[in-house]
Amino acid sequence: MSDLQAEGKNAINSPTSPALADVHPEDTQLEENEERTMIDPTSKDDPKFKELVKVLLSWINDVLVQERIIVKQLEEDLYDGQVLQKLLEKLAGCKLNVAEVTQSEIGQKQKLQTVLEAVHDLLRPRGWALRWSVDSIHGKNPVAILHLLVSLAMHFRAPIRLPEHVTVQVVVVRKREGLLHSSHVSEELTTTTEMMMGRFERDAFDTLFDHAPDKLSVVKKSLITFVNKHLNKLNLEVTELETQFADGVYLVLLMGLLEDYFVPLHNFYLTPESFDQKVHNVSFAFELMLDGGLKKPKARPEDVVNLDLKSTLRVLYNLFTKYKNVE
């Protein structure tokens, strides 16, 4: 009988109700003029979106491993501010003055307010667009939560590589005069790593990649000749710039050859296996470059490890500029 009544009710309402795409049952409980945002199911199936969520989840759990916190679902696990508090405290090395556990909605929002104010103090000077609020985070708005996490990951230079140009279709549901109305908007979650890091100054490699890909091969060939002139002394040879410098070993050895010293093997991993070991090697090579009087590389160690060709070329060109006449 109840099923029959529900079917009859739908039949009466459907001609005057706008079509809604996969509205969650709880969205029918909206108050008048209240709205709820959700990601269109087709966008959730997009491989780049799935990769973004996966990378962010893995990063959060790595940061909070000592807290014995495991985040499985971003909206459900972050909305009350508890995990966000721990995450920010770990990343920023600070202690927030908030209650540890809050069950009431008011208490949760107060905690979120404190956490987000601390986030804003960090991000606002860097010019980040703050595309979230206490209400949107507490309301489990997935787009707001993802914007917040992407901003934190970029600000704290997380050792991860976020997929670039992730855009999702967002369904915004609003209740007006007792009826649910939906609209679709496109939301950009990530751009390029360089843009998100705030490094807007362009250099020769940006121009090469964008406008002169034919000349790129000439530059790569010149750099391969340069590095092999030195690495050949150790019976090593490079054929692929993209991959052979990604673990940092050749970078460390190259610095020793260019500066004419032996690098103790206990200072780096000769056969690195994990991502962290590779990042250690590249970071160590960057330290040797600084010791040699070079400027700090524009690239991040994580970018080189993640096979970002432009970052690797920048690092090698830096070396070429100073050491091209070294025999």
Image (cartoon, rainbow, N blue to C red):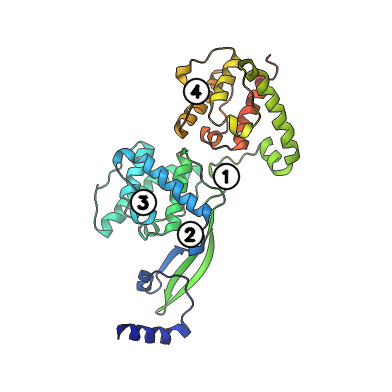
Secondary structure type for disc 3: loop
Q: Distance between the residues labelled 3 and 4?
A: 35 Å
**Residue lying at 65% horizontally and 39% vertically, measured from the top left:** 202
Residue farthest to the top, as pictured: 261
Residue 40 appears in the picture as rendered: no
Secondary structure type for disc 2: helix
Q: Which of marks 2 and 1 is nearer the N terminus?
A: 2
Which is closer to the viewer, label 4 or label 2?
A: 4
The image quarter in which residue 6 lies: bottom left
Circle 3 residue: 72
Q: Which of 206 and 162 is in front in this view?
A: 162
The image quarter in which residue 316 lies: top right
> How far across and how far down the image is residue 15, in percent?
47, 85
Q: How far apart are marks 4 and 1 (CA)?
A: 33 Å
Could you tell me the amino acid type at mark 4? Leu
Could you tell me the amino acid type at mark 2? Lys
Q: Which of 271 and 54 is in front in this view?
A: 271
Circle 1 residue: 195
Circle 2 residue: 44
> How far across and how far down the image is residue 83, in percent?
33, 48
Q: Distance between the residues labelled 2 and 1?
A: 24 Å
Q: Earlier in the sequence, mark 3 or mark 1?
A: 3
**Is 66 situated left or right of 59 in this image?**
left
Circle 4 residue: 270
Which is closer to the viewer, label 3 or label 1?
A: 3
**Residue lying at 35% horizontally and 49% vertically, measured from the top left:** 71
Q: How far apart are marks 4 and 2 (CA)?
A: 41 Å
- Tag 2–tag 1 contact (CB < 8 Å): no
Which is closer to the viewer, label 2 or label 1?
A: 2
